[in-house]
Image (cartoon, helix red, strand yellow):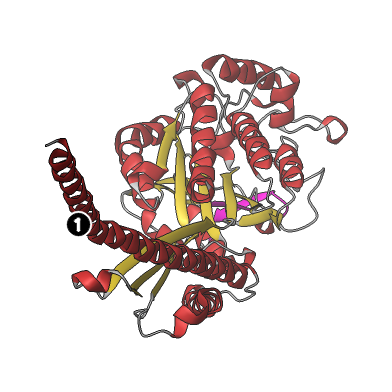
Amino acid sequence: MFDRLRVLLGRYAHDQRGAVAVLVALMAIPLFGAVGLALDYNMALTARAKLDQAADAAVIAGVTTAQNYVESYTGTGNPYAAAIAAAQTQAQAQFAANAGQMANSSALGTPSFNFTIANATVTGSVIYSYSSPTYFAKLFGFNNLTIGNTVASSLTMKVYANIYIVLDVSESMGIGATAADQTTIFTATTPINGGCILACHLDSYYDQYYPKQPSAATSLTTEQIAHNAGATLRIDVAKSAIITALNTLQAANVNNTYQVAVYVFSNVLQNVYPLSGNIAGAITAVNNIDMTWGWTGPPTPPASQGPQAGGTNITHALQQLNSNLPLLSGVGVTAGTALGYVMLISDAIQDNLEFTNNMLGITPDSNFSLFPPNHSYTQFGFNWTLEAVDPSQCAAIKNKGYTMLTLDVTYVIPTATAQESASYDSNYPSMFSYLQNTLLPNIPASMSSCATAASNAYSANTPSEIQTAISQMFNWAIAQSSHLTQ
C-alpha cells in the first residue's frame, strides 16, 4: 500500500514541475517584450540626445553669427536681414555636422530654423522631429517612436546711443535762480546800471542803454557781477544738473557705447563740444559755458555770429541743428547705427532782438519767424516781438529718427521793481503781463508737442526741480538703451 502511495505522490510532483514551466513560458513573453521595448526606447532617447546636441550647437552658432555680423557692420543702414540670413545658413550647417548620419536619414523631418532680431536681442530656435526605428516594438505594431524638441537661445548685443544736449543761454537764462538770488543781483548791479535782474549776462561796458557804465578798465559783465556777489543764476543750475547727469552717464559708459555733443544757442546755434565718447571732455565743456561764452573783452567777430546775439531764436537753432544731424536707422547696435536723443533745455520764449556792430547796435533778427500767438512792442527803433516756441520745428529732427526730450525751464517773471528799473524798460510791465497771461500757459503743450512723447516732456522751475528733471531725462535715455542689454 505504501509503495502505491509513493507512486501517486511522485506523479503529483512531476505534474507541478510541468505547470511551473508552462507558467514561466507564459510570463517570458511580456518580460522579453518589456526588455525589447526598453531597448527601443533607449535607442530613441540616445537619438534625441544627439539631435538635441546638434540643435543646441546650431542655435548657438546662429545667434553668434548674427551678432558677429551686426557688430562688424560698418554701414549706416539696417543689417538685420543679412544677419538673419547668415544665421540661418550657419545654423543649418552646424546641425547637419553634429547630427551625423541622422541628418541624411528620411526618418528626420526637415528641421525648422528661426531667427529674429528685435531691440538688439538675437533670438533663435531649432525645431526637429525624428522617427526612431524600433525592433522589438514591431511585435506589438509599433514600427517607430516619434521624438522631437524645440531648442531656443538668445543673445543681447551692445546698444549705442548719441546724446545731443541743446542748452538755451539767452538773456532770460541769466536771471537769478531764486528770489533771493534775484535780489542779490539787483542790489549788486544798481550802482552800475541802475539795477538788473533780466538780461544780466550782457557786458555793461558795451550796453549803451544802461545809464551808468564803468570805465573800460573795470568793465565786468553783469553775470560776473552777480557771481561776485554770491548769486546763482538759472544757467548755473542747468549746468550743474547737466554735469551731474553726465557723471552718471560716464559711469554707465563701461562699454564705450555712449557719445555726447553739446550745443548752446541764443539767436544762433553753436556747437561747443562735438560728438564724442569722451564724456569727461563734455563735462569740462559744459562747466566752461557761461552767458558770455565766446566773448572775452571786446568781441572780435560780429555779434550775430556768436551764441549770445541778444535775442532768442529757438526756431532757427532747431533748423540749424537739424541740418547738422545725420539720418538715423534707429537700430542702435553699432556706432554707425547709434540711437539718437536730443535734449532741448529752454524757457521756450523767443524774441527777435539781435546785436550788431560788436554789440553796440540792436536790430531785428533776420532769421526770426513769426509763430502765433505773438506780440510786438516798439523798442530800439523797431518792433520787438515776443512769442513761444514753435513745436513744429522739432518734426524734422524726429523724422530723422531722433527721440526729442524737452525741458521747459519755466520763464521767471521779475518783480515789478526790476521791471521798471532801467530807463529803457518802459514796456516791461505790459510785456511781462503778456508773457504771464498769454504765452506761458501755452508753453507746456508746445514743449510736449515738440517732444517725441508726452512722457519725454519735462517742466521745472526751482533749482531742485531743474536738477531732478535733467537727471530724469538722462536716466530715461540710459534706460532705453541699457534695458536692451540685460
Looking at the rendered image, the quarter that the N terminus falls into is: top left
Residue 319 in percent (x, y) is at 51, 63
**In-front residue for pair 334/105:** 105
Rendered view: 469 above or below 451: above
Residue 313 in sight here:
no
Residue 474 in sight here:
yes
**In-front residue for pair 465/383:** 465
Rendered view: 53 above or below 442: below
Q: Quadrant of residue 287?
A: top right
Does the segment drawn in magenta span residue 263?
Answer: no
- Crowding at mark 1 (Cα within 10 Å: few <14, some 14-19, many 20+): few
Q: Secondary structure at mark 1?
A: helix
Q: Residue flagged by tag 1: what amino acid is it?
A: Val
476 sits to left or right of 288: left
467 sits to left or right of 404: right
Residue topped by disc 1: 22
**In-front residue for pair 162/38:** 38
- Identify the residue at image location x=71%, y=46%: 279
Residue 267 in percent (x, y) is at 57, 53
Residue 416 in percent (x, y) is at 45, 21
- Identify the residue at image location x=88%, y=33%: 217
Q: Quadrant of residue 31?
A: bottom left
- Identify the residue at image location x=55%, y=48%: 311
Residue 174 in percent (x, y) is at 60, 33
Q: How many marks?
A: 1
Residue pushed farthest right? 217
Does the segment drawn in magenta span residue 357?
Answer: yes
**In-front residue for pair 319/401:** 401
Numbered range of the magenta stretch: 353-366
